[in-house]
Image (spheres, grey):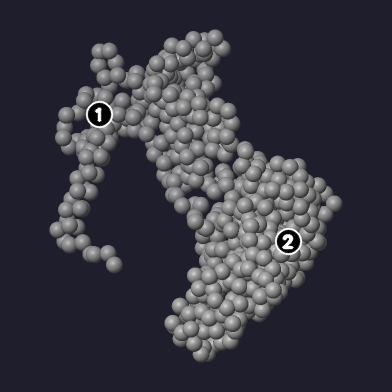
Amino acid sequence: MARRPSTPEVVLTHAAIVGITMVTLYPVLWVLEMAFSPSQSFSMDLSPIPSEVTLDNFRDVIGTFDDEGRWLFGRQLLNSVIVSVATAVLGLSLSTTAAYALSRWSFPGREQGMAAFLVTQMFPGVVMAIPLYLLLDLFGLLDSRTGLVLVYATTSVPFSVFTLKGYFDTIPVALEEAAMLDGASRWMTFRYIVLPLARPALAVTGLFSFMTAWNEFILALTLMGSEDAYTLPVVLQGYVGDFGTEWGRFAAGAVIVSLPVMALFFALQRHFVEGLTAGGVKG
Amino acid sequence: MASLSFRAIQKSYGSTKVLHHVDVQVGDGEYLVLVGPSGCGKSTLLRCIAGLEDISAGELWIGDRRVDQMAPRDRNVAMVFQSYALYPHMTVRENMGFALRVQRRPPAEIEAAVLQAAKMLELEHLLDRYPGQMSGGQRQRVAMGRAIVRRPDVFLFDEPLSNLDAALRHHMRVELKRLHRRLETTIVHVTHDQVEALTLADRILVLNGGYVQQFGSPRELFDTPANTFVAQFIGSPSMNLLPAVGSGGEVRIEGVEGALALDRSGPFTLGVRPTDLVVGSGPLKGRVDVIESMGAEALLHIELGPHTIVAQVPEPLRVRVDELVPLDVGVTHAFDRESGVRL
């Protein structure tokens, strides 16, 4: 039986946990404090509790309209949502099939393909900004959500393929053989056996693709010219001006941008649990 | 239900040949056991029947259909995997009904088929469990159930009992026999356990190094093994093999005093099953080295000149360790010294 920890051990452990939690949460609380205070200046106050609470910053960020009186923030939020969801869906569907093929079949160019995927991860996205700009210009996709989705999906695919291939490798081939003997086609085997078992990995890579697109700034700024086409990170950056930064609105915007990601995390949390394949085949 | 016919089947991986000319006919409803040591090609042959491996040459027929070019799903065979290969995200009911669901049968028909198989295997109370919530024996039965629901032409069992403990294995062996009697379907069962082979099979195919050693009923294999490999592989404990020379109605074992009254001439390998050794009288003399008592019977390890032989005798014993005992032989087998083939 495990030894019961002594009192000093318990106290020290808890103190350490409290300390780490404080260090992690303090910057977040600071942002919250700035978002809810009326001032636009950078708060140097050590206390994370605002002296005066107001929702003005949120109202200002959300309530932006263009020259023709249309709700601009709504449109930009929609841009972000559509681009991120489409990136996750497109990226996942491309990478699950690719990863499955890489995991289950050997074919000429398999190793080289994997290596090429890895090489693309060595370069930061900015390096590709100019060629991507030229390509999108060529296809008339500048300033369009489709263009941005294509760019994001291609950049997220290599990582997703690696993660998913690693997971597919752990799913016993015998399960697929059993399904094929049960009369299932390759596609049915993939759809009814492999995909349900890969749910944790699908959740992780899907969320990763979504977040990459949701948070990306530089390519969005480069490839999207008009305010109408901006995604939220570009909008946020607008509060950091040449002559001064509206810290209150910036913080409020940051909070708004974080909320959907947090919600997604909570929603997908239970899928992250491993051990789904336990008991299928005897080890 | 269907017969199964292997016609000159060969299988190679690159330049390595793992199955050499397997040419065997299995009757409709017959229980065939493929047996042999690890790496003999028995599992490969089973996977070839299933379609999970392609054959390199020859033909495979199930009933009147040539199947070696067909996809696994079109062969109408069901397999019980050594690892069971149950779908972990499905309940027992879903596991057993999966094949019928794939065929888009009506739900009521699927449910009825699953219930019938579950009843046969006493799985009714487990239908809503997941594989992870069951014991090894229960999973094994679910794997059987999944195969039965399909009503296939041929059942393929890949070492289905090897993950069970001894008592359960014996129980399941009896269950398998009963199941075969009820279903009357052709079964191909792979095992490395010769007891399993002897007890279950109508006929046994012994493989070694990818070559068919012998194909016959358990009785044939036990009574008239085709060569020294089969002689040693079938039967437990193994047959004693001794180098011997015969002349003038006498056979002498090399390095041993005394002669046996056997009519054979020239050098050969003498085979004697442990049960066919007579301890207590006879022309040979051996020293008892080790006694393994097994309750009703005992195994005596006896030093006979430079050789050690094993005798199986009924208890209670009248011999002690280190005692010199007279020995004789009952039924004997003779094999060629060089090739090991039965003479």
Residue A153 location (% of width, % of height): 50, 26
> Residue reaching furthest front?
B248
Picture mark count: 2
- Name the residue: 48% across, 36% down: A206
The answer to whether one can see residue A282 in this image is yes
- Name the residue: 62% across, 38% down: B15
B82 w.r.t. A147: above or below: below
Q: Pick the residue in front: A223 or A118.
A: A118
Q: Amino acid at mark 2?
A: Phe
B154 w.r.t. A188: above or below: below
Label 2: chain letter: B
Between tags 1 and 2, which lies in front? 2
Q: Residues within 10 Å of mark 2 (few under 14, many from 20)?
A: many
Q: Pick the residue in front: A191 or B196.
A: B196
Label 1: chain letter: A
- Name the residue: 25% across, 13% down: A243
Residue A26 location (% of width, % of height): 23, 38
Label of residue A38 in the image? 1
Mark 1 to mark 2: distance in Å? Answer: 92 Å
Q: Pick the residue in front: B299 or A94.
A: B299
Decide if residue A48 is on the left or right side of residue B300: left
Label of residue B215 in the image? 2
- Name the residue: 82% across, 49% down: B65
On the image, which quarter does residue A140 sit in? top right
Residue B66 location (% of width, % of height): 81, 47
| Tag 1 and tag 2, C-beta contact below 8 Å | no
